[in-house]
Image (tube, rainbow, N blue to C red):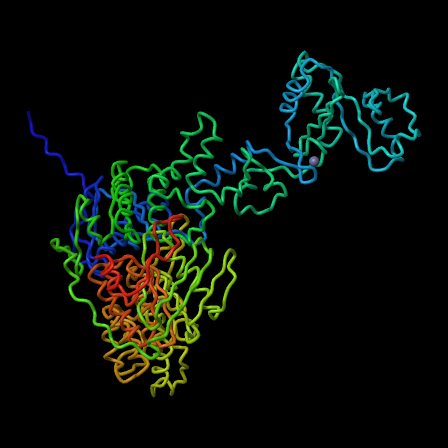
Amino acid sequence: MKKIAQAKKVISVRGASQGPLKNVDLEIPLKGLTCFTGRCGGGSRVMAVEVLYAESRRRYMLALTPFERENLGSIGRVDVEHISGLPPAMYFESGGIKRGESLATFLQLEALLAQLWHRNGVCHCLQCKGPCRSFSAAEAAAEAISVFKDEQILIVGPLKWKNETAIESMVHELLRAGFTRVLLGGEIVRMDELDTSAEIFLNAQGLDVVIDRLVPARSSKNRIIEAIGNARAMASGTSLLVGGQRDQRLLLNKQLSCLDCGKSYPDLVPEDFLQDSRREHPLVNLVELAGKRIKDLDEMRLDEVSAFIEGVLGEGERDLGGLRMLKAALDLGLGYLKYGRNTEDLSSGEKQRLIMGSCLGSGLTGILYIFEAPLVGSRGRETQPLLKGLRALVDQGNTVVALEHAAQLREIADEVINFSRGRIEPGEDLNSVITSKPKRQQPGGGASAKLFVQVEGAHNLKRIEVEFPLHRLVCFSGVSGSGKSVLLNGVLLPALKSGGRARKARKGSINISGGEQIRRIVDLQPGQSSRGKLLLVEMGGAEFLAGLFAATAAASQRGYPPEWFQLDVAGGRCTKCEGRGVLHYDLEFLEDISLVCPVCEGRRFRPEILDITHRGQNIHDVLEMTIERASEHFLREQNLRKIFAAATFCGLGKRQLGTSSEHLEKAESLWLRLAVELARVRATDLFILDNPSAGVHPEDLQLLLQILDELVGRGASVLVSEQHPEIISAADWLVEMGPGGGPQGGMVMASGHPREFAKKAD
Ligand SMILES: [Zn+2]
Ligand SMILES: [Zn+2]
């Protein structure tokens, strides 16, 4: 038997030199789980996002739009020699759920539920609570047969008129059209024998014109449909059936109407049941499906919603796939989440599980899934469902690349690729990296100040009474969903911002005392930085720098104002690209593509502005400087030096001043925000950070702790919600929330110095 050499099924990357990458060759197993790891800035994210994901998107775009291919040629290409075996890629940022997206939208349940309520819901009248329905002529005929069966009925057009003077002419018209009888006071009367001046007409609002007399079960369905159609044509969409033993009157209207009192309503469409319907239909919240209104779902848990929908769906409908994402979310242990919950309030661990649920539930195969920090915010056994989910995606026939530093993921990965300084390094034990803890400096003034917080039943928290020191690093810990983020962001942040006054929450009460000396509360949510500005601008150095250039002899001689050395206003910047250095092209299906500006060649400013130099460098040269270099260059400029030194301290020294903040890694965005604060921190500042270790490499945790330590060292108060053991043990004070997640959480289990916790545990 001949040996057949089988090609290894891989994504093969040759000569990747994008960003920090230095001519990297790489093979990633197709239908495998690969872990990219390495220090911040080492190149792992660039390889995953700016090479693999970007190239996949570029190829997809070229396949879609030949016109753009003609026009853009090879521009927008990723800096790589060759990639083969690349599947269509999807990229999920850590916690990357759009703002304001509800659980229902995210799990793609809205359309299904809107259909269900529209199709099967029972609608009730605003006036009399009676059932409301609309009937097509065929539905009305079927209703007639099922209600009256073998009894004789009249099919009547309930004609309404505007004023009584028209009675005679109307009767005349009807007779001419061939109608001969009306129903009057329960009797059938010939129209040509009507005394239209009779008292009975004085208060009548119309005339019940008899269209047909028949026995439904013994008549052809077409005859019934035709009669109902004629009645409706005459009586603006309404038809009345009268008959049976008790002269029952059944109003079957084309338009949505109350079956009891006849009041009509605008017809309901499935869209009326969506959360952002453009119009508010008066009856939407009176439509019941199995006894529930659609808004009642908001208060139900996801597992209850799932059981409810299954009960309502018909036998053959349960496998149609509409519930797959919901089912996957339940499998990932999210059954306790309330359906109406805003995704912004979810913990990062919950967000990750939700993202995983949507990937698994989509049922796609042959995809390259790229996840950034999928285990962020989860620890211990909480990581198990996520790890299983990653494996399940592979089993479905997908390829998974996870940017993750956690040991659990590296252990189960088929391949671990470690990036460092733009190269692939042989593996190393990352857990041994953290050796020493930073030394705590002497805290600033008012070291004995404390904050006292009392919460009673607000924000799903139980009764909480807790006290902790200010001017210290205080850590709120506990399992995912235990309420630590809610306590920090939902309770403390707004309460402190409102000056620490007692607040009545929507439910329950919140009391805070001891925060009087806090002047400024800073919410340092990771990933919250405004995107797409230059680092120089983000750091607040643009005006100082512009002032320096405008003050040079050459600039003042020519009368150039400081604004001309800035990019946010017209004047000195390139008019073609408005100072961006690149031109954006909108593509129909994808994000923009950027080309270097042909006028300024990427230098952002007009040539005469670039003539002005400060200590031998023009404004563009300065934007090209690394922050480290800039802090030496501007050593004598106190304001700039302070800003650049803080950024260098925060690990951004190797970045250029002209780098756009959107090109920062997740951890770097946090460093940037911390650097800005570090440059201006005061002892009256209080910082709140939710899960700051998210996406931070173990080696960089040391840096995070050093920065937090520096803030506290300068007297600030720092509150973090965090479950990373390194941060917990570095904290000056620990508040442990629990005991479980979701409904099992919401209580303070213990509060004190971490050392005392350790003693208690012994
Ligand atoms: Zn009614
Ligand atoms: Zn330009």
Q: Residue at x 63, y 20 (%)?
A: 142
Q: Quadrant of residue 674?
A: bottom left
Ligand 2 position by quadrant? bottom left
Instruction: Judge left or right: residue 263 versus residue 514.
Output: right
Q: Quadrant of residue 106?
A: top left
Instruction: Judge left or right: residue 268 versus residue 420.
Output: right
Q: Quadrant of residue 469?
A: bottom left
Q: Please identify the residue farthest to the top as the structure is shown.
A: 218
In the image, residue 719 lies at what x, y percent? 34, 66
Q: Residue at x 19, y 51 (%)?
A: 407
Q: Quadrant of the N terminus?
A: top left
Q: Is residue 164 above or below residue 444?
A: above
In the image, residue 339 lies at what x, y percent? 45, 44
Q: Quadrant of the C terminus?
A: bottom left
In the image, residue 227 lies at what x, y percent? 71, 21
Residue nearest the viewer, comparing 264 with 382: 382
